[in-house]
Image (cartoon, rainbow, N blue to C red):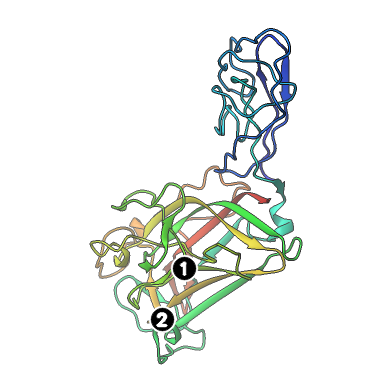
């Protein structure tokens, strides 16, 4: 287990000190206000606490004390830092905010071994003819397959990770992503992650590049970065993309690389699998040569270096920019890193 929620105390007035135990909730999911026992009117009317509880909530308004925790009052709610939700807040009109309902926190390595700290790279392969800042990304045997449709044309590289746990049980995986990507258009889904992708991307700083559902747009020659969940989770997208840019001003097909950094989550089913797919229809992809477009050759001095501070566990022997040699040539590659923060079960 990588992160845990703690216990918090709140002042519920002069009628006594109510103690609540918070349930462990997933990051970025503060949970709903918990419900408690019925409010009773015994005793004199309680007065709201004069100072915040240990959990960080604010004192509630005057109210009658409950025999058991009531529903969240004016002074509590779904905050992740002290007023209900992830951490118990202080008493409100009828009691303190309930603990979050994010479910039991589990060890990610028991559910998806190897996903925490997973390094996903568009590794150079094949022998495709190049120009500018491309590097070869084709079948290792060489050439570039020409199929009857876009979906069967080019090189499709896949990696699969099994989902363990209890077969048929649903789990939610919460994670952070950092890396360097060439961007791409998708359609039919929804921009997602936190923060939400900006309408105008940042050429020199981090971008949120997460896209939920849908499919690739316009049969582009820029590579995809796809995550497929099987079996399908009911009422979920079951396909996600990690290198999205908005389809305005040709942002999603810039001949440049960009820094990506965001938080996201998706549900999986025990006994299933995750498939990570990179598809490039012309068997060549953009190198990490920085934000300048249409370079004659890769300006290696401009290659993006990503801040990896705070990643847990910290990467070891992780030199940047990331490079791979193929056929005696060194290429500056696209990559993303997954830092799992929690996995929960409803």
Q: Position of residue 56 (x, y in %)?
A: 59, 22
| Lateral position of residue 340 relative to residue 218, left or right | right
| Lateral position of residue 129 relative to residue 4, left or right | left
3, 292: nearer the viewer: 3
Identify the mark nearer the N-term, 1 or 2. 1
* Disc 1, SS: loop
Label placed on residue 283: 2
* Disc 2, SS: loop
Residue carrying label 1: 225
Q: Quick one: label 2, few (<14), some, or many (20+) residues within 10 Å?
A: many
Q: Is 193 rendered above or below residue 72? A: below
177, 164: nearer the viewer: 164
> Residue sitting at 38 percent across and 65 percent down?
182
In the picture as drawn, the residue positioned furthest to the front comes out as 41
Q: Position of residue 98 (x, y in %)?
A: 65, 32
Distance, label 1 to label 2, CA atoms, is 14 Å
Q: Position of residue 261 (x, y in %)?
A: 45, 51
> Residue sitting at 66 percent across and 61 percent down?
114
| Lateral position of residue 306 relative to residue 296, left or right | right
> Residue sitting at 69 percent across and 31 percent down?
36
Q: Is 91 rendered above or below residue 178? A: above
């Amino acid at each position: 287990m990588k992160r845990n929620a703690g216990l918090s105390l709140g002042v519920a007035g002069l009628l006594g000190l109510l103690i609540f135990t918070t349930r462990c909730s997933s990051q970025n999911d503060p949970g709903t206000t918990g419900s408690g026992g019925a409010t009773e009117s015994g005793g004199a009317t309680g007065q709201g606490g004069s100072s915040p509880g240990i959990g960080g909530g604010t004192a509630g308004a005057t109210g009658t004390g409950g025999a058991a925790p009531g529903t969240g009052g004016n002074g509590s709610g779904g905050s992740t830092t002290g007023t209900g939700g992830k951490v118990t807040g202080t008493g409100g009109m009828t009691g303190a905010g309930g603990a979050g309902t994010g479910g039991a926190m589990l060890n990610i390595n028991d559910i998806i071994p190897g996903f925490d700290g997973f390094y996903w790279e568009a590794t150079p392969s094949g022998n495709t003819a190049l120009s500018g800042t491309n590097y070869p990304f084709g079948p290792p045997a060489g050439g570039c397959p020409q199929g009857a449709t876009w979906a069967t044309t080019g090189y499709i590289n896949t990696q699969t990770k099994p989902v363990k746990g209890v077969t048929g049980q649903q789990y939610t995986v919460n994670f952070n992503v950092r890396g360097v990507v060439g961007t791409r258009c998708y359609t039919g889904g929804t921009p997602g992650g936190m923060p939400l992708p900006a309408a105008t991307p940042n050429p020199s700083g981090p971008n949120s590049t997460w896209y939920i559902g849908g499919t690739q747009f316009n049969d582009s020659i820029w590579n995809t970065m796809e995550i497929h969940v099987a079996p399908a989770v009911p009422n979920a997208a079951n396909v996600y993309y990690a290198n999205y840019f908005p389809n305005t001003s040709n942002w999603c097909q810039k001949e440049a690389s960009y820094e990506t950094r965001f938080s996201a989550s998706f549900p999986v089913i025990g006994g299933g699998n995750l498939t990570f797919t990179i598809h490039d229809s012309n068997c060549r992809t953009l190198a990490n040569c920085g934000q300048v477009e249409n370079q004659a050759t890769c300006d290696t001095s401009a290659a993006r270096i990503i801040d990896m501070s705070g990643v847990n566990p910290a990467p070891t022997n992780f030199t940047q920019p990331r490079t791979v040699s193929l056929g005696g040539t060194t290429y500056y590659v696209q990559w993303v890193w997954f830092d799992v923060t929690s996995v929960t079960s409803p």
